[in-house]
Image (spheres, grey):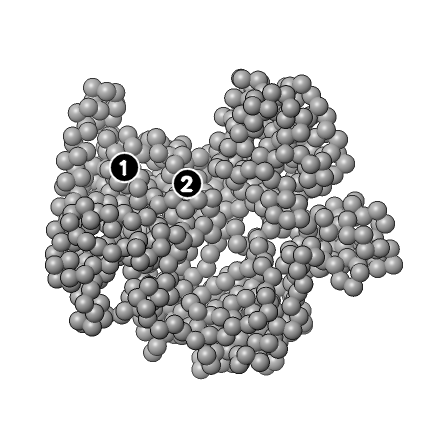
């Protein structure tokens, strides 16, 4: 049956049809839905791991045991998992193993724009790159064949546009593939004596994979009708843009396998078309390869190294006609993303901003605390860096910073890599105050369970990490819990903990308002007779409160009745409807 | 058939996901090649959101660029204006007249451009403005704005009314089918 599927769902389907039996992942936009969709199949095992390194190692273990496995992550997650990756390239696999990695050109939801293809080259691991949902499904199945044939993990590389665009796929049936586990110390124990024998095997494998790339049908030439005296080498979503602009008028070498890249195929293509353009988002990987093998390809001189492409980017680069459109004179105010009405993070941020605290931040919804009017953050780097960064900041501060600096980190991010930073604080004794913003879910990526929620990926009961006990057990004596809707309590506890001469943890705990079990209360309204227009509530930055005709007004479609604004108002102007 | 392009724009949380799901389902059932593209993640937190729906004999690019949209369906007034550059000449903007202040307006750094629909008309855009929020409330849920607007969009297509209703039945949870059918019909008749 034909079905419309996002690229990520199509990958999940392909993994499923290929007999993948175990997936371990950590969520990250734009990769999250692969694992979520796979979790809907009942006859397989699927989990959220605490971080990408753990996930990749769990998937490796499953492959070792003889089941086809996968792990999925966003581009920056691959940095976390890079350690097992490079050595898995040496061990190879038992049953096939696929690593799905999703890049985010344009940084819709990411802190950098790194190009994951570098990892495939550096770790000498083959990488497939689909350009739509049907290819996502087909390539996922092919990836397992390559993995087992060449004894290597295989990358399946997505980008935001392929991951989150829906196109039509045809589904197939699942086939089971298992292998027996056999003890093979020389293959799987990567101590120097074995690893030194493995490296030449890896180099030999790359040569064989290059041969494979020369003739694989996923690297194909589509001959043009002769309208243009040049050819285009492209892959992924850029292929779709090229076809949108040129249709069948230009010859295209469409690469489905981006590592290793073919040599003969590219040379043959270049000799047929004459001039060669390489159109690839982000870094010049294919272009550099072309130049290395002696093809004078034009790439980043004409097409940006920054951001996403589109049909327009390509049409403009070739000087094709610009399309007519309407252009307004009025400037439209920007509408940046922000923390939701009733978001529990906002209360703690309000208190931090009010007290002019230096705040080292982390990765999650709460990164939005950096936006006006709160402007509450000083730094955001990567998962877990708030905690380890705070330690270094305070060590360098030599006593001057520790009573006015904190870090904030979400519950899921703390599990991912915050706890190691906290161990460093306890072990190397910095007088640091760590705030865990515990909203009892992984928020920004769309509500995934994590080790602190007590539920697994399917929503069933699971083991639960007790944050208070964990913090105490690593050596933090002062662990306090506050309700971020209670601004007075937050402020009191914050001041007390900052004043202490020892490391401490404040857990700011209240579940995300978007969770189904959090029932909204009736919206508040503003009594215009009481409101004096002082705008104190506007400093809170709640999207449900705006200011019209000299008074605050509440948007009753957004307000969830948290009542924090009422506690800020000196004139008791916010009133809740009688329930 | 040449590819037709529909943009759905609004504020994160307004229900563009259901609208695009409905359109995708309907157009696949009609036998077209279809691509639907949206960006998940950070932009959904109350930010400006955009979904592209493209259909025809063969669709390549999943995105709609400057001057390419046959229709822009906007769930909020200034969001229509934000993406007006994507409308092709002769294209139509279907817009909910609801006003949702963005943060720069809330904090007083900028003002909300109230007259923006008039300017769009002056510049030659075909603007079809309706109060979808009131119609959705009449149907039984303020959240059904998305389906009111789909009802309005349906007027511009040759696809039989029953097929839209069938698509609603396939895409909406059983408890909400009646409210959404009513919302659709109010948008269609408005």
Residue B111 shown left or right of residue B18 in the figure: right
- The residue that appears at 61% across and 29% down in the rendered structure is A434
Chain letter of mark 2 equals A
Could you tell me if residue A146 is visible in this image? yes
The spot of residue B181 in percent (x, y) is 57, 72
The image quarter in which residue A365 lies: top right
Q: Is residue A465 above or below residue B106?
A: above
Q: Residue furthest front?
A: A301
Q: Residue beneath label 2, please? A: A76
Q: Earlier in the sequence, mark 2 or mark 1?
A: 2
Farthest residue to the right: give it.
A529
* Contact (Cβ within 8 Å) of mark 2 with mark 1: no
**Which residue is located at x 69 percent, y 36 percent?**
A356
User: Which residue occupies the foreground of this view, A150 or A64?
Assistant: A150
Disc 2, SS: helix
Total marks drawn? 2
The CA distance from mark 2 to mark 1 is 16 Å
Residue B48, by quadrant, is: bottom right
Quadrant location, the N terminus of chain B = bottom left
Q: Residue at x 52, y 54 (%)?
A: B43
Of the numbered discs in the image, which one, if any, rests on residue A122?
1
Residue A426, quarter of picture? top right
Q: Callout 1: 10 Å neighbours few (<14), some, many (20+)?
A: few
């Amino acid at each position: 049956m034909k079905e419309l599927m996002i690229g990520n769902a199509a990958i999940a389907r392909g993994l499923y049809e290929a007999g993948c039996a175990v997936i371990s992942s950590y969520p990250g936009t734009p990769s999250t839905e692969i694992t979520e969709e796979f979790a809907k199949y009942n006859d397989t095992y699927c989990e959220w791991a605490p971080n990408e390194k753990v996930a990749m190692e769990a998937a490796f273990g499953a492959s070792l045991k003889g089941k086809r496995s996968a792990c999925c992550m966003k581009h920056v997650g691959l940095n976390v998992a890079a350690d097992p990756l490079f050595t898995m390239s040496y061990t190879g696999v038992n049953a096939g193993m696929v690593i799905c990695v999703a890049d985010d050109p344009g940084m819709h939801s990411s802190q950098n724009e790194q190009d994951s293809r570098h990892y495939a080259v550096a770790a000498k691991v083959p990488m497939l790159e689909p350009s739509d949902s049907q290819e996502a499904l087909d390539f996922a199945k092919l990836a397992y064949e390559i993995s087992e044939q060449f004894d290597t993990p295989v990358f399946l590389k997505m980008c935001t546009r392929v991951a989150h665009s829906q196109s039509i796929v045809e589904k197939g049936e699942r086939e089971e593939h298992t292998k027996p586990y056999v003890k093979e110390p020389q293959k799987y124990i990567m101590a120097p004596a074995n690893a030194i024998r493995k490296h030449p095997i890896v180099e030999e494998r790359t040569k064989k994979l290059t041969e494979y790339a020369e003739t694989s049908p996923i690297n194909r030439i589509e001959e043009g009708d002769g309208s243009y005296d040049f050819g285009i080498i492209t892959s992924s979503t850029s292929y779709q843009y090229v076809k949108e602009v040129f249709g069948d008028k230009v010859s295209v070498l469409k690469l489905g396998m981006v590592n290793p890249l073919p040599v003969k195929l590219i040379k043959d293509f270049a000799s047929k078309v004459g001039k060669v353009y390489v159109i690839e988002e982000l870094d010049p990987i294919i272009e550099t390869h072309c130049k290395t093998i002696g093809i004078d390809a034009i790439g980043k001189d004409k097409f940006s190294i920054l951001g996403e492409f589109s049909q327009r980017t390509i049409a403009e680069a070739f000087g094709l006609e610009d399309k007519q459109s309407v252009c307004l004179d009025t400037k439209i105010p920007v509408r940046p993303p922000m923390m939701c009405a009733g978001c529990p993070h906002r209360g703690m941020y309000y208190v931090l901003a009010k007290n002019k605290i230096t705040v080292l931040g982390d990765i999650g919804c709460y990164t939005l605390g950096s936006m006006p009017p709160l402007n509450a953050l000083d730094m955001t780097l990567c998962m877990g860096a708030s905690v380890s960064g705070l330690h270094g900041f305070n060590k360098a501060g030599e006593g001057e910073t520790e009573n006015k600096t904190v870090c904030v980190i979400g519950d899921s991010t703390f599990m991912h890599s915050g706890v190691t930073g906290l161990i460093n604080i306890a072990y190397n004794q910095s007088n640091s105050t760590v705030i865990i913003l515990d909203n009892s879910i992984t928020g920004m990526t769309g509500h995934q369970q994590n080790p602190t929620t007590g539920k697994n990926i399917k929503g069933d009961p699971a083991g639960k990490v007790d944050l208070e006990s964990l913090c105490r057990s690593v050596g933090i004596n002062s662990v306090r819990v506050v309700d971020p809707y209670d601004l007075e309590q937050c402020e009191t506890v914050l001041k007390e903990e900052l004043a202490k001469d020892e490391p401490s943890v404040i857990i700011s705990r209240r579940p995300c308002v978007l969770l189904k079990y959090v029932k909204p209360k009736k919206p508040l309204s503003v009594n215009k007779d009481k409101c004096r227009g002082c705008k104190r509530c506007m400093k809170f930055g709640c999207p449900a409160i705006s200011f019209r005709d000299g008074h605050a007004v509440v948007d009753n479609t957004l307000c969830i009745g948290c009542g924090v604004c009422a506690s800020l108002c000196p004139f008791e102007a916010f009133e809740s409807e009688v329930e | 058939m040449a590819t037709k392009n529909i943009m759905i724009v609004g504020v994160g949380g307004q229900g563009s996901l259901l609208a695009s799901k409905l359109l995708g389902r309907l157009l696949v059932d009609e036998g077209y090649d279809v691509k639907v593209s949206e960006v998940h993640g950070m932009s959904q937190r109350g930010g400006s959101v955009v979904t592209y729906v493209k259909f025809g004999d063969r669709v390549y690019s999943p995105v709609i660029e400057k001057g390419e949209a046959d229709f822009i369906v906007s769930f909020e007034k200034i969001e229509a204006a934000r993406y007006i550059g994507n409308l092709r000449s002769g294209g139509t903007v279907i817009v909910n007249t609801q006003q949702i202040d963005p943060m720069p307006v809330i904090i007083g750094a900028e003002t909300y451009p109230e007259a923006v629909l008039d300017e769009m008309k002056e510049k030659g855009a075909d603007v079809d403005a309706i109060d979808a929020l009131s119609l959705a409330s009449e149907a039984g849920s303020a959240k059904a704005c998305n389906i009111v607007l789909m009802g309005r969009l349906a007027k511009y297509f040759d696809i039989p009314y029953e097929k839209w209703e069938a698509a609603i039945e396939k895409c909406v949870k059983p408890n909400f089918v009646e409210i959404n059918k009513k919302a659709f019909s109010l948008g269609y008749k408005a």
